[in-house]
Amino acid sequence: MKIRGMTAVGWVVSGVLGSTLCVRAAVSVEVSDAIAALHRVGPTGQGNAEAKASWKTLSTSPVSTLPSLLDALEGANELAANWLRSAADAVFSRALDAKQAVPTAELGVLLMDTSRSPRARGLAFELLQRAQPEVVETLVPGFLNDPAPELRREAVARCITRALQAKTASNPALATLVYQQALAAARDADQIEQASKALRELGQAVDLAHVFGFLTDWKVVGPFDSTKGVGFAHVYPPEQGINLASEYEGKEKKASWKDFKAVDEMGTVDMNKVFGTQKGVAAYAYSEFRSDSARPVELRLACQNAWKVWVNGQYVFGRDEYHRGLEIDQYRLPIALRSGVNRILVKVCQDEQKEEWTVQWQFQLRLCDASGTPIRPSKP
């Protein structure tokens, strides 16, 4: 049996948390209006004054409104989601302090419904963990392949703990199996690195570039002039169309496309390895990704130089800044893959600073679903 993405097991679990024969309490017009006001808050301060008043209304509302506050996380922007989370936490905390009954049954149903917003399910988990920690703890192993990143992370953490216990108990075979299970399920970089390090200590080979799903096969061309930062805005020929047989006027000499294979475990496309250490330059990297269907994905990029990205000839996004640090999945860009070959073009600029810490001229890129699961290219 499955109802709105919830399995029969989910109904059993919600029965443990409380009776499933609960009726969603109708919220007042005042609460509905307050939720709508929070949904209108904008990134530049739009609707902030109204949001503060609405938050006060919601944070002092009856505990029966709690499921509606979690429902409101569906489709909310980041600012609105922060207001709603804070209001829900205030309502829940006040109810616990007053020893009032909280709607654990409805929160349990929402938690187990994988079709619901990961943010709402993650918050439901946090609240239920405070109300009935022993019950909720029994659910965590079932989240190992959950689409909600927060829930999956909890399950992977437990898995890593079990593996460490097996290793400490001198059972390397069991530790290896459980670490491998954790690595297969992990989506956060710190957990992937933790599990892979442990596996290597146990003598197991780990291909991190494959685990993360980095694109490693590229064509690169350059360098082009970017003296005084002009290269970021200047339209060089690769932006007008890809012809891998073309030769262009580079900064100091002719530039033609070269093959580049990212061989380090973090899938780094290092322009310095192709062109040497240079300053005041720009270069392009091009890769083709074959998809067996049209689908929305996230293009996840890390770069501490100025960059721009195009997919299938359409400009996606760019940042004209330098040396602000580098971390995996630094930028998450929603894009749409089409069925067949998809053409990805990245422009990476290097400024003219001379300090040693400004030398890096590189990026890493992968395609994932919303949970961080890598999207693999299909075979021709």
Image (cartoon, rainbow, N blue to C red):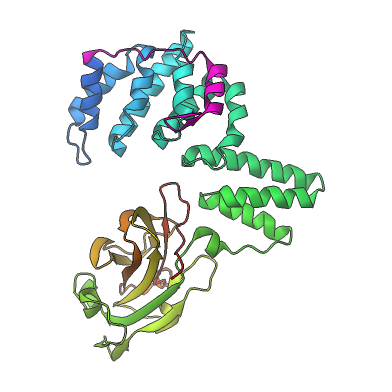
Q: Position of residue 186 (x, y in %)?
A: 55, 48
Residue 27 visible within the image? yes
Q: Indicate whether 296 appears above or below 95.
A: below
Residue drawn 31% across and 70% down?
Answer: 345
Q: Residue at x 19, y 37 (%)?
A: 45
Asked where in the image residue 233 lies, by quadrant, the reply is: bottom left
Q: Is residue 51 visible?
A: no
In magenta stretch: residue 20: yes
158 left or right of 22?
Answer: right
Task: Give me the residue at 46% from left, 39% from top.
Answer: 148
Q: Which residues are magenta?
A: 1-29
Extreme-bottom residue of the structure: 253
* Residue 297 forms part of the magenta stretch: no
In the image, 151 versus 198, the foreground residue is: 151
Q: Residue 20 versus residue 99: which sits nearer the camera?
A: 20
In percent of width and height, residue 313 lies at: 24, 68
Q: Residue furthest right?
A: 170
On screen, residue 349 above or below 221? above
The image shows a total of numbered marks equal to 0
Q: Position of residue 322 (x, y in %)?
A: 32, 64
Find residue 82 and report its horizontal and vertical position in percent: 34, 32
Q: Is residue 348 left or right of residue 158?
A: left
Q: Quadrant of residue 57?
A: top left
Q: Name the quadrant of the C terminus.
A: bottom left
Relative to 360, say whether 57 is above or below: above
